[in-house]
Amino acid sequence: MAETDYVLELKNIRKTFGALVANDDINLRVRRGSVHAIIGENGAGKSTLMNMITDIYEPDGGEILLNGEKVRFKDPMDATRHGIGMVYQEFMVFGDLPVLDNIMMGFEEKRWGIFLNRKKARMRIEEICRDYHFQLPLDARADTLPVAVLQQVEIVKVLYRGADILILDEPTSVLTPQGIQGLFEAIRFLKAIGKTILIITHKLREVFEVADEITVLKNGKVTGHVLPDEVTEEQLANLMVGREVILQAHKIKSEIKSPVLELQDLSVKENGVQRLKNLNLKVRSGEIVGIAGIAGSGQQQLAGAVVGLTRVEKESRIRIGEIEVQDKSVRERKKMGVGYIPQDRMGEGVNKAGSVWESAVMGYQTVHGYRRKYLLDRKQAEDFTNRIIREYSVKTKGIHEKVINLSGGNIQKLVVGREISLCDKLLVIEDPTRGIDVGAIEFIWEKILRIAAAGTAILLISHELNEVMQLSDRIFVMYNGTLEYAGTHGELKEEEIGLLMTRGGDADEKKA
Amino acid sequence: MRKKLEINEEAKSNLIRYAAALLAVLLIGAVLIAVQGENPGKAFSEIIKGAFGSKINIGNTLRHTMPCILTAIAAAVAFKSGVNNLGLEGQIYFGALTAAVLGYAFKLPPGVHVIVCLLASGVAGMLYALLPAMLKLVFQVDELISTLMFNFIAVLLTEYITMWWIMGGRGSDGSNAISTPPMAASARLPGLIQGSSASLGVVLAFLVAVLVYLFYRYTVKGYELKQVGENIRFARAYGIPVARTFLGIFLMSGFISGLCGGIEMSGSYGSFTAKFITNMGWDGILIAYIAKQNPIAIVVVSFLWGALRAGSLQMERMTSLNKLTVNIIQMLFVLFAAIDYKALLDHMRQKHIRSREAG
Amino acid sequence: MQEILLAVISPVVFAGAVRIAAPLVIGSVGGCFTEKSGTFVLAYECFMLISAFFATWGSYVTGSAVLGALIAVMVSILVGILFGILVFRFQANGMIVSIALIYGAWAVTTLLLVSIFQVRGSFISPDIISFQTISIPFLNQVPVLNDVLNNKIGPVYLAFLLTGAAYVVMYKTPFGLRLRGVGMNATAAQTAGTNIRRYKWTALIIMCACCGLGGAIIPLSGVSMFTENMTSGRGFLCLAAVLVGGGNPIKTSIVAFLFAYTDALYLTLTSFGLPTQLLSCIPYVAVIFVLIVSKLRARRKAALGAGRLKWRKKVTA
């Protein structure tokens, strides 16, 4: 049989979930030894397609050809055995185990047929690391490592399993600009050695940098198959969403007045670890202060300290208006007009087991108060909920529907609506648009800008650098528990801020 | 409109659950009885006769319904807010001992005496629940395991107190002899139905259930407690004082359990005997679970439980069957009611589709 | 006072502890597997009580303790399969199924006691054959150890062996690695080709077999009787040992042994005229005490661990 040019071919793949057509007649050919990008918005069907290649789902129709032969994998392992390795967006990591055990899990080297042979596994992994220029601390526990290293662990893992085709699902979403460069270097290296790489992403710029070929998905269909030097970013965006995709926030000029939030020597220690070190920050009325930084630099502790969830050190002072609040409870601060939109909206923002109204009125019962103090006024609660649903166009069957049935974007609108309606003084926002569709992002951005213009002070913490840069009046970068000023709106370029985020010297983030 | 629709849907799935469980239990129960060489029809009819056959029998049913309601409410209050209080039995023991001691040791006017005894029993249960609650709050000791241990300790400790403090060390280790003096008449709850063992206690239990129902449905505090139970991080992030709530829930649950012990003394036993009950706490936990922590459903299931208990005595008298057969039937009912039938149905449907695809 | 202290550390107490520890250690070592595989089982008491009964019955009928124990293990596994079907297959809540099984085990054994042996309370018969004691010759020479360790029934030595074996399986074999992987992160384990359901089932069967053996030892260690509710909370002690030991077989066994030791104090201390009820409390109080200590240690460790992490980051920077 002649060696085919294409290592992987998908023919007329179709997949439906009930009424929803996730993939409709998809044709895709991946050239051996190339970097092939599959781009599309959230919900365009990228992940479904990849899950069919690795057989988490079974296609309703169509066929998959590997090296020119028709294949149908029995389970994900079967795909692995055929040389397809997937690096998931959510890393498949066992936090309590050392890196070595993480990598060999499921594909252990054995001694005498029954015992683990860690020595042999270590030798093999070290060989892979040498061949592909990775440096991994094999004995460190996985949960002590930064994400960039974990991603390398995941890549080495699929190589250890003998993958020839690597599928990377949104690999850059957790990385800093520098981390992304490191990843791309690794991808180029893998390509040079002869591996085939499939990248799934929704970020256009990256595609141009690293991909040899691009396939665009929209609403479950292939809308284009192009080479990067044939198209412009705008054309690609058009194929992806049918309109300009690079989101542009339209900042409204607002009058910045007196400080609402003042942090003075804010320090937080958790389990003996200093998470925040003597932060000083002012957020004034009508101003959006954005905090960028790589995940885990202390952002969570900052938000927690301001809303009252995190205990602060003795010398720390937090003032809201003129009042010192570092010893006040969450509830007391809430009554002063402090709103909070948490990062984990499902886990912290709502009660997904309860109905929409229950999540909608949270905080209302004490902040604005019911007409009756001890009894729940259902009428009033329902009116309030209906108002949020109307004003924030939350799509729901009604106020008694369970929150868990709502989409991520609608849940976020509910949370944003609630906090904006309840709190007009200070709003602490963490990652307001993570994982929601473009329409909802625009909507939420606009609401945030609008209330800032109306005089609310906003502390915006986001891991999406673009978001911070678009919305903020002043930008700070958080690094290892400290804050660094990064200019006013539009003053610094993305790369410059990116450099601040890593301080240029963090070895963990740099590809060796 | 919509609200009604949704409640109906939930009720429907619950109804399916109960019906399926009941059917399965009747079938297996019949086999169980037949294996022991008895006619299942006769056994079942004796149970029903024993539970509802006469005014006295109904009274007995009600008497056995009382502890079921109270323990189940105590469990439900805790579970609703995510507190795994498995220590109901221990709290009952201390409530009972306290009521019994106050009942014989003091002389008070009739009405007042009962009330003092019952309130004190609740407080005793509450204080006993305070121990695991504090262990959790101060040391993060999981209350699931600590309350289990406190159950064993309570049984032994109440026996010790009765034998060494009250009886002066005279009792022998055979536990039936270890008992407090009888309570004064003024400390006893009036009977409800002549000739039966039902007392006013069942009415009190019912009132507690109704109060708890109203509390969760119509008060701000009830709303907050529900949020704490369903998503504690959500509750904390928006200002509900979680630690205080946890403590409050634990104490409330303990109070109701203790009250149950007190009513058992004032209403039925009249004096505290060591090891006077077994598995009463488990009963409550199981009922609370079957009833999905809904106070009204708890009353219904408790009544069924009480009827089975009362009926089992009659069955034992009239047939060669042991009354424990009914306990086994109750356990089977719980097991079948614990099955997630909806998930099962979905699973089967999916399998069906898969097999059709493959074929 | 001094007398009591001396008695507390006397070889007699330790000998008693070694004897009492066997069912606890074996049961909780089994529990390590379900704990590590991420299945919440509370029903140790159920498995142990049921198997205690069937061990009695089996030994009485066959005249062999080993056969009796085998029957007990089989029955325990059957009950475990029921648990597995309800919880794994039918998605029932593990805690409620456990409680119902505990409740049911008491009713079933008491009922069977009446219907098979026609007695209430307890069944005593010389025909219930206990395990043979094993005498290890070379221990005869060693003064204290001989009293503590020698001339015990077979399962006591088996408990030591099982602990070691469980440790090796858990940390030195692919099976153990994957089992722990399943408990830690089921999706990740799945992508590593692990059949989650099979590992959870295997862990459950191991646990039931161990609890079955542990339960069987209780009536077959020389008492030649079965009494209603014979396990009297030993299953819960096993659960506590597993939770404190975090599923590590060696740590768990040590904790289980500690509970057994406190239980063994009972016999010694009654001779000093202390109230039996208070003495019976000791193991349960010990559980709570051990829980507090283990939580405090975990907290300190977390602080230290976090500190270490920071230090490492600094070095690489």
Image: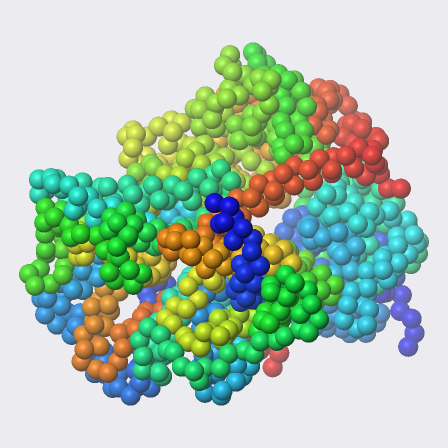
Q: Is residue A499 left or right of residue A393?
A: right
Which residue of the protein is positioned furthest toward the left in this rendering? Answer: B194
Residue C61 percent across, percent down from the top left: 45, 87
Pick the front one: B317 or C22? C22
Residue A179 percent across, percent down from the top left: 80, 40
Residue at the spot x=52%, y=52% of the render? C8
Compared to C63, does A54 lie above or below? above
Residue at the spot x=26%, y=44% of the render? B122
Pick the front one: B227 or A471? B227
Residue at the spot x=71%, y=24% of the render? A482
Q: Is residue B201 left or right of residue C210?
A: left
Q: Quadrant of the C terminus of chain C?
A: top right
Q: Is residue A268 left or right of residue A39?
A: left
Residue A136 percent across, percent down from the top left: 83, 48
Pick the front one: C191 or B86? B86
Q: How many marks?
A: 0
Residue B49 percent across, percent down from the top left: 15, 74
Q: Is residue A285 visible?
A: no
Residue at the spot x=46%, y=49% of the render? C285
